[in-house]
Amino acid sequence: MIFKPRQLGRDSIEKDELENDKKKCRRFGPCGVGEKAIYLNSFYFDRMYYIPLTSVKRAFKRVAMSKGGFTGKGMFATMPYLVVEYDDGKEKQCIFKYEEQVDQLVAYIESTHPEIRTHSAKAEKRLKEKEKKLSEKKKANLSRQARENIRVLENSYSYLKKNPDLYTELSLAAKKKRTYDRSNPAYKWVALFITLMGVAALGYGIYALITHAGFAMYFLLFGLAAIFLFSSANVLPTAKNNKKYLENRLDNAVAAMENYVKEYPGFPVPARYAHPVVLKRMKDILLEGRTETIPEALGILKSDLKALNSSVTVEQEEFDEIMAIKPIFLVMNYE
């Protein structure tokens, strides 16, 4: 361990224990989760701080939305954060480049440390209100068949939650494939042009530095180079951003899920739709008395998802659920 992470909070971990735990920790972007502590980033350095897991009260995702919000039309779309609450209400917020890394970290904590809450206090309050509304909508006298199917969905849900990596990867692979499919091919040429402009600006910046062409010019040209290069980095085709790679990634995610659910006799949905949110929403459909069978509940869920578009306003928790599963249904053409 080159740098010892700095302690946050009252509790501490012995140096040797901390070094071993950090080395073996599961990494999610700039943060990590070990057996003893959660490791958090500073603005410049990854896993710069640590908080013993015994001190962590909550670990949840926070999303800063630009103008456009959930429609995805904002200039910078979303900025994801991991928020960790510890001790007596203290809070540490860590910025991530990729939202899916926050989702993976939170899902990992939820499966390995169920004592740590994975929603903010406000989100928990909204979820309780949602549950109350659902209980009011719940059909008073469910049939025996409906109750049995609800039990099947609950057990299947628990089985899936044991392996968050599989369903998280399935959702992420579908999102990446969907984004690529919907990208205008012309954008790639624009991105290439922007990148070439960045390279040219960088080259001239180096030339200006050597020839002493002016102090301000260095910052301007190097800054432009960085902006141009980074703004186009996720658009240009790369080894991990091309049609074949993304198709193979999705196929592998579905195949991995198929291998997992075949160990569970009578799993209620096809492996390509095996996500806890799918099972949860199907259960809600049965509780509301909209149907009594699992196949019909899946059909109703598909219809509900088809009806949701950028003109529909939803709460953030529901938006997160929809964004986790709708890309899966879209890339599978709701089959």
Image (cartoon, rainbow, N blue to C red):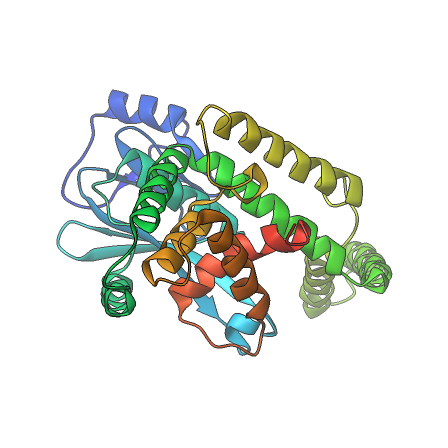
Residue 332 as seen in the image, left or right of residue 304: right
Q: Nearer the viewer, residue 57 or 151?
A: 151
Across and down, in percent, residue 182 comes to 74, 60
Across and down, in percent, residue 179 comes to 68, 56
Across and down, in percent, residue 282 comes to 42, 53
Residue 102 in view (yes/no):
no
Residue 67 as seen in the image, left or right of residue 116: right
Q: Nearer the viewer, residue 133 or 210?
A: 133
Residue 261 in view (yes/no):
yes
Q: Residue at x 25, y 61 (%)?
A: 124
Give the quarter of the figure containing the N terminus. top left
149 versus 302 height, above or below: above
326 versus 75 height, above or below: above
213 versus 1 height, above or below: below
Across and down, in percent, residue 63 comes to 43, 63
Q: Residue at x 18, y 42 (%)?
A: 55
Q: Quadrant of residue 81?
A: bottom left
Image mark count: 0
Q: Residue at x 31, y 33 (%)?
A: 112
